[in-house]
Image (spheres, rainbow, N blue to C red):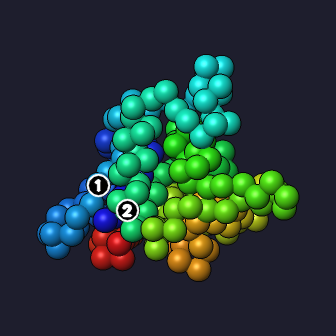
Amino acid sequence: MKTIVYAHPWDGSYNHAILTSITENLETKKEPFQVFDLYKDGFNPVFTAEELKHFHKGETPYPSVKDYQEKLKQSTELVFIFPVWWWDLPAILKGFIDKVMLRGFAFTEDQHAGALKGLLTNIKKTTVISTSTTDKEYIESEAGNAIQSVFIDRTLADLGMKNESTKWIHFSRVNLTTDEKRKQFLKEISHNI
């Protein structure tokens, strides 16, 4: 099953148009999917001191986190849709990774080597779809490239999503481009997922 993790607060955004285009195409193909709309779900990305007591044990006090984990166990493909803000993931998506991808569920740690072993090997394909007001090349050259180098090559890989099965698709200059280019991207992206 495809799982879409969507991280944008405004239904009028281009990110929402991407989500709509993809989900409508999946519905047309009668392909099963589920959407984690983090803002609509009211997901709280901030750790509390109480939560941290559970974190190192790989536990959570929140039923919503356990629900996300159960749904991720059913997934064979993940699609992330989000805007790049300040060269990085939105805080809500970073918090989702922090709070949901827990030890024992998403990874184990080799105490001797200090390395992580990803447990989400049921996810065979991952697509990262991002938008920004700048060019992808600029994002790739600045700040060590938080999307490719950190999120994809480290975080997702450490969770068991191998780099060779992960694709990053970026729509640049979302605020400055033409409506025709926006429509063309929506058409293409819905058929690539």
- Amino acid at pointer 2: Ser
* Residue at x 66%, y 55% (from the top left corner): 108
Tell me residue 48's x, y (percent). Answer: 61, 21
Q: Nearer the viewer, residue 63 or 176?
A: 63
- Which one is nearer the viewer's eye here, 191 or 97? 97
Secondary structure under tag 1 reads strand
Q: Earlier in the sequence, mark 2 or mark 1?
A: 1
Pointers 2 and 1 in contact (CB under 8 A)? Answer: yes
Q: Residues within 10 Å of mark 2 (few under 14, many from 20)?
A: many
**Residue placed at 38% from the left, 49% from the top?**
70
What amino acid is labelled 1 in the image?
Gln
Question: Measuring 46% from the left and 73% from the top, which residue is drawn there?
Answer: 124
Frontmost of labels 2 and 1 is: 2
Q: Residues within 10 Å of mark 1 (few under 14, many from 20)?
A: some
Give x and y (percent) for residue 179: 35, 62
Q: Return the x and y of residue 144 as percentages of the image width and height.
A: 78, 59
Q: Is residue 155 visible?
A: no
Report how far apart the C-alphas of labels 2 and 1 lie in the structure.
Answer: 9 Å
Q: Where does label 2 land, which residue? A: 75
Against 9, residue 33 (above or below) is below
Pick whichever, 27 or 177, lies toward us.
27
Q: Residue at x 33, y 64 (%)?
A: 2
The quarter in which the C terminus is drawn is bottom left
Asked where in the image residue 30 lies, by quadrant, the reply is bottom left
Who is closer to the viewer here, 32 or 104?
Answer: 104
The image shows residue 163 at horizontal and vertical percentages of 61, 74
23 left or right of 162? left
Secondary structure type for disc 2? loop
Residue reaching furthest to the bottom: 164
Q: Which residue is mark 1?
A: 34
